[in-house]
Image (spheres, helix red, strand yellow):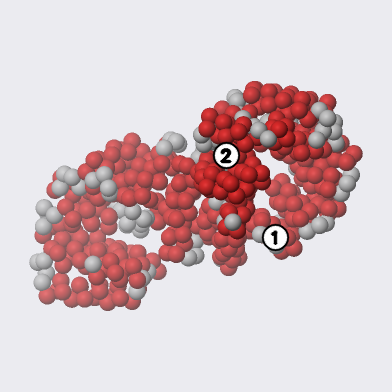
Amino acid sequence: MFMSYVLAGSHVQWWWLICRAYKRAVELEPESACLWYDVGTSYLYAMQVDPTKASSFLQEAALSCLKKAVSLDPTSYVYWNALGVAAAYPGIEKFSLAQHAFIKSIRALQDNAMAWANLGVLYLRKDQIELAYKAFCNAQSADPSYVISWIGQALVAETMGRVEKMDLFSHSTELAYTSEGSMGFAYWVCHTLTNLQPKMLLLKSGCGLNDAASKLLLLARDCMQKYTVRHASDTSAFNYLGLLYENEGLHHSAKEAFKRSLQLLETSRANNHQLNIARENYARLLCYTGDYVEAIMMYEQTEEAMEMLFSCCGLGLAWNLSSNSQKSLQVYTQAVKLCDNDNTLKSSVLVAIAMIHYAAGEKNKCKTCLFSAFQTPPPSMHCLAALAVFSCLTDDWSLFTATLTEMLKTIEWQADESAAAYSMEYISLVLQCISVHVAKKGHPTAKKFCTEIDNICGKLKHDDFKLYNPVEATGLVKQGKNFTHLQKMYHSHPGNLWSILMLAQTVASELKHRFVPLLKIYVADALQAVQGHPKRVQELTKLFIITLNNWLAKL
């Protein structure tokens, strides 16, 4: 217990004092196997805490002490295991002796999870993957709660390219905290989140992470928080922590994590590639938090920023958010040139340029950019959504119909089910917003238009939207039947977010004091129903619910 406390405290000078004390004790009692074991392990711990003192003399001294311990007591599985660790120690690396020692330890105690796991690590270091796998399996059988065996299995899966590697790292972090398990788990979660195709597999019918994926994200973030406390100079750890915070929407915390990673890299004089990644991450979060001028400075410090697509897009966004549309257009135009091999990205960048033109009141230039994006096969979903919205705002319904047709075609050729689900959710949400806009605008063809959208959403199998046609609801309000209609919809489809929100809105705006108890029920139901929806929908819903709650508080 005392030795563990000292190790945790990292009091280097104490270790050498402990080594001298044990050495004096063994001189007084040279036939004690226990004391020889204590001297040998003390040398190993001291070299681990203070690698600068890890001389070949100390390494050989540790090995000799442990050999003496097993010669005095060859039946101790603990001594044999320690000898194996010493023989495999970096700088000694007598792998044959280590293998022999671990096997002797297992023979001394059959259900020896520690020795089996150490043997697995040894095989892994020698690239004997199959033997490593069997050794870790035996370690798990001996003690299913021994965390090192699970980390070993994760490393084997990682080496073999198997998909369960992240789950194995995840399970290891649930058993106990370890630096290796935490870093491995965080790496694969971040890798998944920043890689499009695996990310789609985490999605639940669209752009919101499902419950299992959200739990993984929280667990990885918790692991990295613990890790960065213990390893305050690890630049990769702070970078992972920043990515995890960012994916949770905790932008200020992410910004601080990326800032710390960048500071450590600058202090350690890291290579330019690492510094560029750190600066790009930090600049992106500066944009999120509204520090646009500092974000621009950070992007401009990034070497060859104008030659890297995502740095170029980030800089263009920062200039645009800082109200310098001309600079933004120049940078985005450069970004288009960097998209030669990726038409989907090129389409998205052209949409960004179109948005800048629309904000400046240049609708013709906006339309030209959107058509250019549309004619870049295959057009991105952002391009199709922007065209649909633009045609709606400019009352160009023939263009709108053509865009809807193209949206459906885009979904049909997507072979990946999760990618198609993402597109369907995205389109449905866009159509929901457009339909409400048209209904409020009172366009002469609004009813026909909303019916057409209802049919399109039926093809998309988006039941949430089909339940509510804004024009029909508006007509029912005028007839005084909206509340009854929405109540039927609410009870026929329990848990449907849109029906709950529309019913709550109707109660709040039309019926007021008479149905306060009902409104409270609908608010509670909406909070529960919104959990499975995309993050943006959750934010808007919660904002609406906060408004309702504030209204209730005044009654």
Q: Name the residue under label 1.
A: 290
Q: What residue type is labelled 1?
A: Gly
Question: Element type at marker 2?
Answer: helix
Q: Which mark is residue 21?
A: none
Which circle's residue, 1 or 2, is located before the other in the chain?
1
Q: From what the image shows, is residue 84 above or below residue 493?
A: below
- Residue 487, horizontal then vertical, whole percent: 57, 34
- Residue 442, horizontal then vertical, whole percent: 80, 35
- Residue drawn at 15 percent across, 47 percent down: 109
Q: In which quarter of the image is residue 280?
A: bottom right
Q: Which mark is residue 500?
A: 2
Q: Which of 233 and 95 is in front in this view?
A: 233
User: Going by the picture, which residue comes out furthest to the front?
Assistant: 514
| Viewer-side label of 1, 2 | 2
Q: From what the image shows, is residue 407 above or below residue 528?
A: above
- Residue 75, horizontal then vertical, whole percent: 11, 53
Q: Which amino acid does label 2 sit on?
A: Ile
Q: Residues within 10 Å of mark 2 (few under 14, many from 20)?
A: many
Q: In which quarter of the image is the N terminus?
A: bottom left
- Residue drawn at 62 percent across, 31 percent down: 485
Q: In which quarter of the image is the C terminus?
A: bottom right
505 lies left or right of 320: left
What's the distance in space between the residues labelled 1 and 2, CA to CA?
34 Å
